[in-house]
Amino acid sequence: MLSSESSPPQADYALETSNLIASLEPDREAVASEVAALQSIYGDDNLRPWASDPNHNSQNGGTQESVRYEVCTNLPAPHDQVPIRILVTIPPSYPLTSPPQLQLLSKYIGAFGVNSSLFGSVLRIFHSTNGVEWSPDSVCVFDGVEKVLELCASWYADQLSLEKAGELLREDEKAHRTDPQPDEDEHPPYIGHTPFSMADDATLHLPEDLQMYEAEPITDRKSAFVGRACKLDDPAHVPEILRKLLSDRKIARAAHPVINAWRCRTNGVLHQDNDDDGETAAGGRLAHLLQILEVDNVLVIVTRYFGGIHLGPDRFKLHGTRWKVAVFWKKVAEKLSGAESGRITDVVISRVPLLPSLSDDEVAYICPLCVFSTPITKDESPGQRSAARQSGKHEHSDNSLIKQQGYINGNWLDAASGATIKVTNPANGDELGTIPEMGLQETKQAIEAAGKAFETWSTTTAKYRHDLMKKLFSLMQEHNEDLGRIMTLENGKPLVEGKAENQYSASFIEWFAEEAVRTYGKNIPSPFPHIRNVTIKQPVGVCSILTPWNFPSAMITRKLGAALAAGCTVVIKPPPETPFSALALTELARRAGFPDGVINVVTTQANVAEVGKEMCENKIVKKVSFTGSTPVAKLLYGIAASTLKKVSIEAGGNAPFIVFNDADVDAAVDGAIASKFRGSGQTCVCANRIYVQSSVYAEFASRLSEKVSAFKVGNGLDKDTTHGPLIHGRAIEKVKRHVDDAVQRGASVLVGGKHIDGNFYAPTVLCDVPRDAEIMDEETFGPVAALVKFETEEEVIRLANDTPVGLAGYLYSRDVGRVWRVSEALQVGMIGANTGLISQAPIPFGGVKESGLGREGGPSGIDEYMITKFIAMAL
């Protein structure tokens, strides 16, 4: 561990540095030359050979020793009066095979105590993607020190901003105590239209009709960005307008209150300027965007409230977004006749031509960020509104997420035939909307677009893909409420489950974003002295993704996240029952900036056979990933075999859930409910056969029945609903068949056992289910718990393994030895030991036997979308 003790006082640092340089030559000539250069840059007394023991000779430059010295300097302007101390540690292997290490010795920068985040950032300066790149056999201490100074200067500026904000807040509190003001809630900080009051400041010479338009804030990592815009007829008004804004304490307390740019054309002459307001290059970027959009006679201002987390270059993108929103809002407001309020609540697609300087993509990207209650989307026309707008029944905060078209090569498209598929709510049969009935033509088009996009997407850096995926993850978090509601409407699961699934779905995007930068190759020792062996990982190519309806989003992102991180492009075929979740996810990916052709979505129902066949046998496709039933998996596997594609399959399950006599019965009951009844039993890993040892059988059955009888079945949007409908009538018929068959063969119904209405079936507990009942051999995919009594460990292992599939299994026992024995004996791909929930992004999800091939999620998940290439190099 590095010490933070200072150098001995009153030392002749110039002489000590000269002695250090002499001790390094000639064995460590590169290090000696670098130290001499640093001494000339920072000054004779500011480079100080360092030792933890003051009595230790500072000439520590032996070839097998680390070299340590301290750099004493000041922060760059405008904080060049603030001193800083940095310890440099040079390992013996530097610069050939190891980078140096830098440590911040200053416990305070100015008046502010250094926090652990800044300290850690300095320590990782040569190991972080945001730090300094080091290459073997290259000296880099100067670059590292300068980067540290940059980090510290930025951190110090932020502390000053926070301190100033605190002072203003305290002044506000003091003013409220001595001179009460109206409640701030009467004047919310983000109003749509704020006319200036001329009575506020008689010295301001502003146009009487000046109106400032303000957009909703964007928040990213605790920093908030607010965009404002107003019409500008005279450049002389700019300072007065900014002064007026700064008279508002909410604005003045921001870290960067008035980043601005303006253009004003008077008498045929264009006047323009900008101000960064302390945020490097921000004003210039705003001015550049104004120039691109050819917008004149406008002043745009971005206010940044710093939240304590550095955003790096991303902050510029946020600035641009905010002011473009404000400009867009202003331009629409000017064009709309008779608009009395700045909060425009009904803007339709027919008004898009009023914005000739904005492209369709810019309109589609900007509008969802505005406060319009009816955002514009570039694929809509007056006759093609979302189901939510048509009926007025389903309110979303961002209706532009509801897409009713396929997505190919960056375009939202209808089917060439014009045919559509109705999508209904399984809870009540209401039509939610339609999707295109696409076919062979659109599928080939999507695959070709993916193939073309792969040529460039596969060459992007892992860091680039990581950043886009993190943006998508953030958007999914931001729109969690809407995505959860869409899922509930089309799938039927309770809203709390819908929102939870979206979080689970987003976790795959986040996980694989981090995995993108860790697709390491290997160095393989060669038996030949002149040969070096290495392997590298490369993306496999275009991937076909076919997913089921039970997890409309998570089943996609578990595959999509890995594919995108690896550098693959995809064609997705979502289920016709639940397409809107997939399309909303695609829309967010488009907003995140994924290039055209990287993600494509083909929707179909009647043409599923020919679409699926094309996705599996087209020669452009190199990988097929399917989740669904075992019979369909076998069919697709056979088709893909014709071109020997890489295939991963997650097929059916028939999970055993085993409760031993030493188990915590209450915990086992809770685990069984979590596993069996989540999604009304419509999950591939849910407990299908519940084996309970005889001595606790009655107790377990009683407690399980008691809890199941308390379930509330209903529409997923109702807050009291615990369990929603099954997906369709066919699912109801299968559940009825399984229950009736079990009862006819001797099983007893403890709870439920009946069809309620429509797609609703009562959550059911059956006891004494015989071995020959259909429910023992087939996956029910419904809310039925089938209980079976057993006597011995050997017996239950034999019963549990007596099935052609093997996806998941569960067991409850306090005996650690038994947990290990049974876990190893069960023929399944995943085990839940004393838990009923196993699914997570970091785990290798998959089964054995006829439950599938390969693994999804976890470190092995990305390997399914990559190839390993071997390279032998002769010296």
Image (cartoon, grey):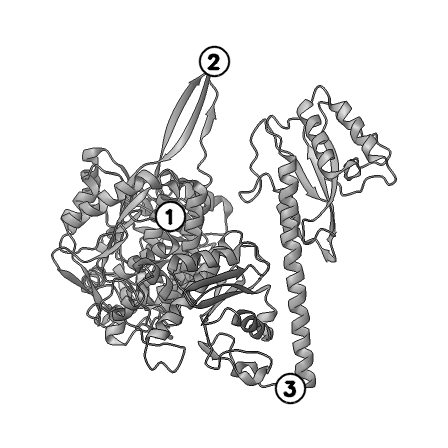
Which comes before the other along the chain, label 3 or label 2?
A: 3
Left or right: residue 763 versus residue 173 is: left
Q: Position of residue 120 (x, y in %)?
A: 64, 47
Which comes before the other along the chain, label 2 or label 1?
A: 2
> What's under tag 1, amino acid-wise?
Gly
Q: Residue 763 appears in which quarter of the rendering?
A: bottom left
Q: Position of residue 521 (x, y in %)?
A: 44, 31
> What's under tag 3, amino acid-wise?
Pro
- Residue that badge 1 annotates: 561
Closer to the camera in the image, 18 or 24 = 18
Q: Relative to 258, is 156 above or below?
A: above
Q: Position of residue 781 (x, y in %)?
A: 27, 58
What is the number of the mark on residue 398? none
Mark 1 burial class by Cα count in 10 Å: few <14, some 14-19, many 20+: many
- Residue that badge 2 annotates: 530
- In this orientation, does residue 365 appear? yes
Give the CA distance from mark 3 to mark 1: 54 Å
Disc 1 on helix, strand or loop?
Answer: helix
Q: How many marks are shown on the rendered structure?
A: 3
Disc 3 on helix, strand or loop?
Answer: loop
Closer to the camera in the image, 96 or 340 = 340
- Residue that badge 3 annotates: 180
